[in-house]
């Protein structure tokens, strides 16, 4: 997610990618190319796969 100098923002995301620096660079370039304005803030989020309900919590004694 990029926030620009005029406080507008844009988001670029991809599903199913293993986190790697090249993917982040590609997404950053894609988002920046939309406006080309000066950037105030760069936000990065990673979503992990959900766990299976039966393994989400260990049994109590």
Image (cartoon, rainbow, N blue to C red):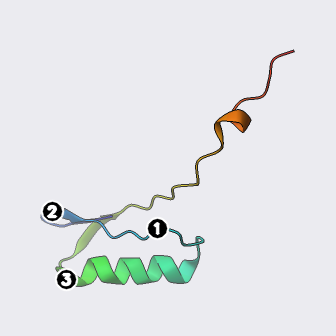
Q: Quadrant of residue 41?
A: bottom left
Q: Earlier in the sequence, mark 3 or mark 2?
A: 2
- Kindly report the distance in space between the C-alpha atoms of the residues bearing marks 1 and 2: 24 Å
> Answer yes or no: do the residues labelled 1 and 2 have beta carbons within 8 Å?
no
Residue lying farthest to the top in this orientation = 61
Residue drawn at the location 45% of the way across and 81% of the way down = 25
Q: Residue 61 in the image: state x and y as whole percent.
A: 87, 15
Residue shown at 71%/34% (left/top)? Answer: 54
In-image side of 60 versus 26 (left or right): right
Q: CA distance from mark 3 to mark 1?
A: 25 Å
Question: Which mark lies nearer to you, 3 or 1?
Answer: 1
Circle 2 sits in a helix, a strand or a loop, which is it? loop
Q: Earlier in the sequence, mark 3 or mark 1?
A: 1
Comes first in the chain, label 1 or label 2: 2
Which residue carries the number 3 mark? 36
Quadrant for the N terminus, please: bottom left
Q: Residues within 10 Å of mark 3 (few under 14, many from 20)?
A: few
> Within 10 Å of the Cα at label 2, are there few (<14), some (14-19), or many (20+) other Cα atoms?
few
Element class at badge 1: loop
Give left or right: position of 8 versus 61.
left
Q: Is residue 39 left or right of residue 59?
A: left
Determine whether the residue tagged by mark 3 lies in a helix, strand or loop.
Answer: loop
From the image, tell me which residue sits under label 2: 8
Up-down: is 30 above or below 59?
Answer: below
Report the residue marked by disc 1: 15
Q: Residues within 10 Å of mark 1 (few under 14, many from 20)?
A: few
Q: Residue sitting at 46 percent across and 68 percent down?
A: 15
Q: Residue 28 occupies which quadrant of the picture?
A: bottom left
Residue 21 at x, y percent in the picture: 56, 78
The one nearer the camera, 32 or 13, is 13
């Amino acid at each position: 997610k990029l926030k620009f100098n005029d406080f507008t923002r844009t988001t670029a995301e991809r599903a199913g990618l293993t986190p790697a620096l090249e993917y982040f660079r590609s997404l950053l370039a894609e988002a920046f190319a939309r406006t080309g304005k000066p950037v105030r803030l760069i936000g990065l989020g990673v979503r992990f796969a959900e766990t299976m309900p039966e393994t989400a919590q260990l049994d109590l004694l």
